[in-house]
Image (cartoon, rainbow, N blue to C red):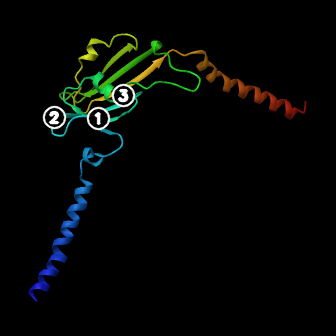
């Protein structure tokens, strides 16, 4: 009788509490742990090493959330992401001498709680700005990289051609509707 009573107590009182605590633990898992094995998370820092978690967005080959060693610089982070994207199509290859890179680093000031943005701009064929080379990233910084270039003739054609085509089609339809 005591064994049956102990079994009933375990099933009725103990097991539901364990199951509920497991469900609650899953809901309360911190965001950093929920996406630990996600596609956009890249671990650079060795396990056990003091690390910062940063976000890298924009025109890089591998954007995402990076776990990097503390004290990582901007150019190291961009290198971890395999550098800026190369803009290539079937007909053209980007002329890197005309490319301008713009890097923006957003950081929340812990004293004021306001977001501060640090910008770096330079041409691809120029030296990396000294301020950027020594800029140390901190935990929860958001880094975005944008690749800019001067428009070429093809860019203007891609913008103007659809408008001209629409106008000519409208004229053609109007002409056909009038019966000419």
Q: Which of marks 3 and 1 is nearer the N terminus?
A: 1
Q: Is residue 121 left or right of residue 94?
A: left
Question: Farthest right residue?
Answer: 180
Residue 4 picture quarter = bottom left
Q: Which of marks 1 and 2 is nearer the N terminus?
A: 2
> Looking at this view, is 127 or 16 the one in front?
127
Residue 21 point in image, percent of width and height: 20, 62
Circle nearer the viewer, 3 or 1 = 3
Relative vertical location of residue 78 with respect to residue 51 in this rendering, above or below = above
Residue 168 point in image, percent of width and height: 76, 26
- State the residue at coordinates (14%, 79%): 9
- State the residue at coordinates (16%, 81%): 8
Q: Which of marks 2 and 3 is nearer the N terminus?
A: 2
Q: Name the residue under label 3.
A: 82
The quadrant the N terminus occupies is bottom left
The kind of secondary structure element at disc 3 is loop
Q: What is the number of the mark on residue 66?
A: 1
Q: Residues within 10 Å of mark 3 (few under 14, many from 20)?
A: few
Q: Name the residue under label 2.
A: 50
Q: Residues within 10 Å of mark 1 (few under 14, many from 20)?
A: many
- State the residue at coordinates (48%, 17%): 149
Relative vertical location of residue 123 with respect to residue 57 in this rendering, above or below = above
Give the Cα distance between marks 2 and 3.
23 Å
Q: How crowded is mark 2: few (under 14 residues within 10 Å), some or many (20 or more)?
A: few
The quadrant the C terminus occupies is top right
> Looking at this view, is 137 or 163 the one in front?
137
């Amino acid at each position: 009788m005591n064994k049956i009573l102990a079994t009933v107590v375990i099933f009725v009182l103990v097991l539901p509490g364990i199951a509920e605590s497991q469900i609650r633990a899953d809901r309360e898992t911190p965001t950093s742990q929920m996406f630990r094995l996600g596609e956009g998370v890249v671990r650079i820092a060795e396990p056990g090493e003091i690390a910062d978690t940063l976000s890298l967005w924009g025109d890089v080959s591998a954007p995402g959330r990076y776990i990097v060693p503390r004290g990582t610089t901007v150019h190291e982070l961009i290198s971890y992401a395999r550098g800026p994207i190369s803009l290539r199509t079937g007909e053209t290859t980007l002329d890197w001498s005309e490319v301008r890179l713009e890097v923006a680093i957003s950081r929340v000031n812990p004293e004021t709680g306001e977001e501060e943005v640090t910008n770096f701009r330079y041409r691809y064929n120029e030296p990396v700005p000294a301020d950027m080379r020594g800029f140390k990233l901190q935990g929860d910084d958001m880094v975005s990289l944008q690749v800019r270039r001067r428009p070429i003739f093809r860019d203007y054609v891609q913008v103007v051609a659809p408008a001209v085509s629409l106008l000519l089609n409208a004229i053609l339809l109007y002409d056909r509707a009038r019966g000419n």
